[in-house]
């Protein structure tokens, strides 16, 4: 339905609690004129998805929106155009263009990206205080978060396990040093500590909750939703790791406003075209780099390197520079692999078109398509 329709102002639109706004209404208006229905994907499962619509939650088949590009598959958080009520089965006909998307490289050897959540305003990275704080992992998550177009938020979860104020303050300071420009909060889903403050940060937008298994994401999601939407399991004592309580991505409305997408625990988060995100995470290094003598300074042995000078005088920790270099190298490598993959796909497409063209010429010339190896064709 068009956002300009007087009987459906923004505040009373049935999909407003799920992130609908006037801009989405304007994009959807041409489809509304065809009698189609707007819905937001709350769950994807084996070729079908659940969508919340003005009529309630519906189930739809995604057979018509199965692209070759894995970055364009239907994902939790997408706004989709669906068949009207009465159609059996109902199909997703198309997706509205995404505003943001959280991507990571797949764990396979193929150079492809996986979309974890679409149209998110806040990328919430959960790191458990039940284990040693890995700042390099934090920086990796935040690089992807910045690159997604969402605003990152860093959570130190299970804060109740660190009751000593000085120890906790030290951990918060360490985390903040790896997250310039990012809100860093200590929270506990079990005790509720920090949850009201987090609700205020996330109210009114779409958030995706990301982190490793065992980070307490499902417990925190239930605390934010004020209901047991998601199943919770204990962490293994021997290694402190979780058991993948969440196995699918689910979109849950929050009582204080906004919606939350909980994701399965991520064992790996490979970068994908995250050059700008890396720059955001290491903003101070890129700022120092403007003072280097050479524009293409690698910050290693070049004379007049302002970055190395900052390390030597203690202004910039060596760990930060090492992490910056590592993520830059990884991002450059994945970009090169992706380019090679695209070139190979393009060559396959050219060969396919060439074969189709030759077949068309043979059909025109001989009235039939000769079998491969036929000697009559010149």
Image (spheres, rainbow, N blue to C red):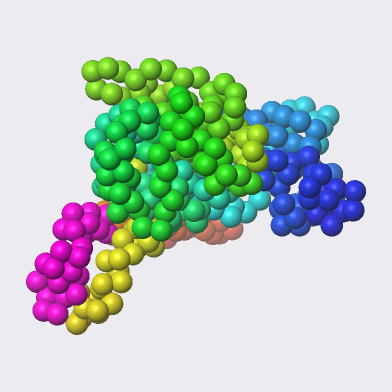
The C terminus, quarter of image: bottom left
Residue drawn at x 34%, y 42% as measured from the top left: 269
* Residue 351 seen from this side: no
Q: Which residue corresponds to the image point at 24% horizontal and 35% vertical from the top-left?
A: 132
Q: Predominant secondary structure in magenta?
A: helix
Q: Which residues are magenta?
A: 301-328
Q: Residue furthest right?
A: 7
Q: In the displayed structure, does residue 311 sit left or right of residue 231?
A: left
Q: What residue do we see at 70% from left, 34% from top?
A: 52
- Is 248 above or below relative to 336? above
The part of the image, by quadrant, that contains residue 78 is top right
Nearest the camera: 360 or 204? 204
Q: Position of residue 82 (x, y in %)?
A: 73, 39
Q: Nearer the viewer, residue 175 or 168?
A: 168
Q: Is residue 44 above or below residue 173?
A: above
Give the quadrant of residue 158.
top left
Give the percent coordinates (x, y) of residue 43: 59, 31
The residue most toward the bottom is 293
Is 265 contained in the magenta span? no
> Residue 113: percent from the left, percent from the top?
41, 47
Residue 199 appears in the figure: yes
Is residue 115 shown left or right of residue 363?
left
């Amino acid at each position: 339905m068009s956002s300009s329709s007087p009987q459906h102002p923004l505040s009373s639109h049935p999909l407003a609690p799920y992130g609908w706004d006037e801009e989405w209404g304007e994009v959807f208006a041409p489809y509304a004129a065809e009698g189609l229905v707007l819905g937001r994907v709350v769950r994807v499962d084996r070729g079908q998805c659940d969508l919340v619509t003005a009529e309630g939650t519906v189930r739809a088949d995604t057979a018509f929106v199965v692209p070759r590009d894995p970055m364009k598959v239907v994902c939790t958080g997408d706004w989709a155009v669906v068949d009207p009520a009465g159609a059996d089965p109902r199909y997703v006909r198309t997706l509205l263009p995404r505003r943001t998307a959280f991507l990571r490289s797949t764990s396979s050897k193929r150079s492809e990206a996986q979309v974890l959540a679409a149209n998110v305003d806040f990328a919430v990275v959960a790191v458990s205080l039940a284990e040693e704080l890995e700042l390099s992992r934090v920086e990796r998550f935040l690089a992807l978060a910045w690159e997604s177009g969402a605003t990152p938020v860093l959570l130190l979860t299970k804060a109740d396990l660190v009751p000593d104020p000085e120890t906790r303050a030290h951990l918060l300071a360490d985390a903040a040093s790896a997250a310039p420009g990012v809100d860093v909060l200590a929270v506990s889903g079990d005790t509720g500590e920090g949850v009201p403050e987090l609700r205020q940060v996330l109210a009114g937008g779409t958030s995706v909750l990301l982190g490793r298994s065992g980070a307490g994401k499902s417990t925190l999601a239930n605390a934010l939703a004020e209901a047991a939407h998601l199943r919770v399991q204990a962490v293994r004592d021997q290694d402190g790791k979780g058991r993948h309580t969440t196995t699918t991505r689910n979109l849950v409305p929050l009582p204080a406003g906004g919606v939350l997408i909980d994701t399965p625990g991520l064992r790996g988060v490979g970068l994908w075209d995250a050059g700008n995100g890396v720059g955001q995470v290491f903003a101070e290094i890129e700022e120092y780099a403007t003072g280097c003598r050479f524009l293409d300074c690698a910050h290693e042995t070049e004379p007049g390197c302002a970055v190395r000078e900052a390390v030597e005088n203690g202004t910039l920790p060596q760990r930060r520079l090492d992490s910056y270099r590592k993520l830059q190298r990884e991002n450059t490598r994945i970009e090169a692999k992706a380019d090679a993959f695209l070139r190979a796909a393009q060559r396959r497409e050219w060969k396919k078109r060439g074969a189709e063209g030759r077949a068309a010429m043979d059909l025109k010339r001989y009235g039939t398509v000769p079998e491969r190896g036929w000697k009559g064709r010149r």
